[in-house]
Image (cartoon, helix red, strand yellow):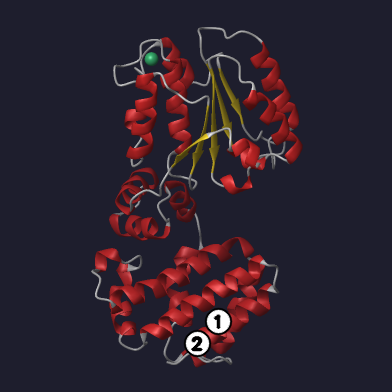
Amino acid sequence: MPLRDVEGQGRAIEALLRALRGGRLHHAYLFAGPDGVGKGLTAWATAQALLCTQPRDDGDACAACAACLRVAERQHPDLHVVERLEKSGGGLERSIKIDQVRALQRALSFKSFEGARRVVLILEPESMNPSTANALLKTLEEPGPGTHFVLVCASPQLLLPTILSRCQRVQFAPLTRELVQRHLAAQAGLDADAAALLAGLAEGSIGKGLVLVKSDVLAQREALIARVDDPEGLRHVPALLDLAEQLAKAKDDLPLVFHLLRTWYRDLLLVQNGLPIEALVHRDLAANLQQRATQLRPQDVMARIDLINETEDALARMANTRLSLETMLLRLVGAAPRRLSA
Ligand SMILES: [Zn+2]
């Protein structure tokens, strides 16, 4: 896929095309931004543009020459990809290994095969341990003529400062909800309502949306919200204690549970401030939101959002999961100290 076909990242793409047109490409780029917004696609497209033998006037790849096709098939001899390897038992290794970086260094010590340029894509460089990162740093410092690096990274704060300082950063923004919705509908075969809900929860990431498609938590969304945000929530206390126990055992689901609750209360605030239904994540439950918005004061809604955030932070600091969840759920329905009204 050439750069012109990458959707939703106009600023990043235009900056890269400008550099390609002017022949002023930096020797190392860091593509930074959330997962699932097009950093990887753009990295492959940049490799194609660099290795294309018949580039267009705008600097982009032709997407038709032999070099372009070989990049698309990962078969180009001057394209080196360093990424977490597959484990023999399935799944990926936790990190890029130092042997992979050494193999790259050996490959780069030879002349390029086809032309003046070589491209190295490093996916998830933040997974490297410090000694591997230091080995990579040597290569970044002495890249050799015509060698271009693209580091694709969702968490640049985890990279060594010495690596960061050698890269030109290109920031990738979250995608618009409309774009995510369109891709989810097409890629996962969802109807418009389901795609709209998931796009609202996906925080601008097609990748995150595709993970959500497979989640069971979403099917329980209405039941979860009905229990947790009920003016007569005290009657649910036994059920909420059961829920805390279940959730404590299914830790992988917790980020989505927090996210569902947080977006629910954020929607309530939006309704209270008169924003249109289209702005809501849970727009399919707009009638419930509108009714609830008349029952809670905005400061009570904000206190609930704070409570959800505080609980999530506490769990990140290894607090007792079940106890923290019980406390949060009981406080949300007003059945525990630091009572929230209604
Ligand atoms: Zn080409």
In the image, residue 172 above or below residue 216:
above
What's the mark number on residue 237?
none
Question: Which image quadrant for residue 296?
Answer: bottom left
Residue 201: image location, x then y, percent: 41, 60
Residue 144: image location, x then y, percent: 60, 16
Q: Nearer the viewer, residue 222 or 84?
A: 84
- The three-letter amino acid code for the residue at tag 2 is Val
Q: Quadrant of the C terminus?
A: bottom left
Which residue does the image show at 43% across and 49% down from the upper left?
Answer: 205
- The three-letter amino acid code for the residue at tag 1 is Leu
What's the mark number on residue 333?
2
Which residue does the image show at 42% across and 27% down from the upper left?
Answer: 45
Assess disc 2: are there few (<14), some (14-19) or many (≥20) residues with their C-alpha within 10 Å of its C-alpha: many
Which residue does the image show at 42% across and 56% down from the upper left?
Answer: 203
Residue matched to label 1: 329
Label 1 close to label 2 by CB (< 8 Å): yes
In the image, residue 229 above or below residue 132:
below
Q: Secondary structure at mark 2?
A: loop
Residue 113: image location, x then y, percent: 56, 7
Residue 102 appears anywhere in the view? yes
**Is 52 displayed left or right of 10 in the figure?**
right
Question: Which image quadrant for residue 196?
Answer: bottom left
Q: Nearer the viewer, residue 317 or 76?
A: 317
Question: Which image quadrant for residue 15?
Answer: top left
